[in-house]
Image (tube, rainbow, N blue to C red):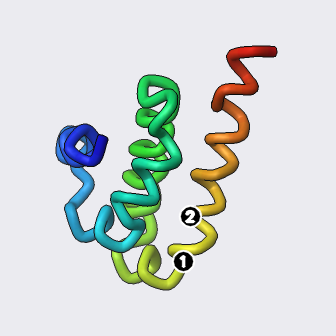
């Protein structure tokens, strides 16, 4: 999964430093079950924050970003499919 994250980030123009800050293992765990549903919104969020706010902002806001990804998981994760 982590290699898929790296490829998606590269295609989206997100530097590897951003993934290092967020933690690839964390991202992998969030999107492990449904990568097609969750990878695009996660990459979009990362790119928007990187382009609009910069790497320094991401460094200072890692925890709120992780909470956003967990929200995406809750919204689009397994329970959504079963509903």
**Residue drawn 42% across and 54% down?**
46
Residue that protrudes farthest toward the right in the picture: 83
**Residue drawn 44% across and 74% down?**
58
Query: In this figure, which residue is indicated by the disc labeled 1?
Result: 61
Q: Is residue 73 above or below residue 33?
A: below
Q: CA distance from mark 1 to mark 2?
A: 6 Å
Dot 1, crowdedness within 10 Å: few (<14), some or many (≥20)? few
Would you say 70 lies left or right of 62 here?
right
On the image, the x and y values in percent for residue 15 come to: 21, 61
Q: Quadrant of residue 65?
A: bottom right
Query: In this figure, which residue is indicated by the disc labeled 2?
Result: 65
Residue that protrudes farthest toward the top in the picture: 82
Q: Is residue 76 above or below residue 62?
A: above
Q: Is residue 35 above or below residue 62?
A: above
Determine whether the residue tagged by mark 1 lies in a helix, strand or loop. Answer: loop
Dot 2, crowdedness within 10 Å: few (<14), some or many (≥20)? some
Would you say 82 lies left or right of 8 here?
right
On the image, the x and y values in percent for residue 32 come to: 45, 38
On the image, the x and y values in percent for residue 70 come to: 64, 52
Q: Which mark is residue 4?
A: none
On the image, the x and y values in percent for residue 12 come to: 26, 42
**Residue drawn 50% across and 37% down?**
41
In contact (CB < 8 Å): disc 1 and disc 2: yes
Determine whether the residue tagged by mark 2 lies in a helix, strand or loop. Answer: helix
**Residue drawn 38% across and 58% down?**
25
Would you say 83 lies left or right of 30 here?
right
Would you say 38 lies left or right of 63 here?
left
């Amino acid at each position: 999964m982590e290699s898929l994250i790296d490829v998606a980030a590269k295609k989206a123009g997100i530097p590897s430093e951003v993934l290092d800050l967020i933690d690839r293992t964390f991202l992998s765990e969030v999107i492990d079950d449904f990568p097609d549903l969750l990878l695009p919104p996660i990459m979009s969020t990362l790119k928007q924050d990187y382009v609009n706010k910069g790497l320094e902002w991401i460094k200072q806001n890692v925890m709120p970003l992780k909470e956003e990804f967990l929200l995406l998981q809750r919204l689009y994760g397994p329970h959504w499919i079963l509903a």
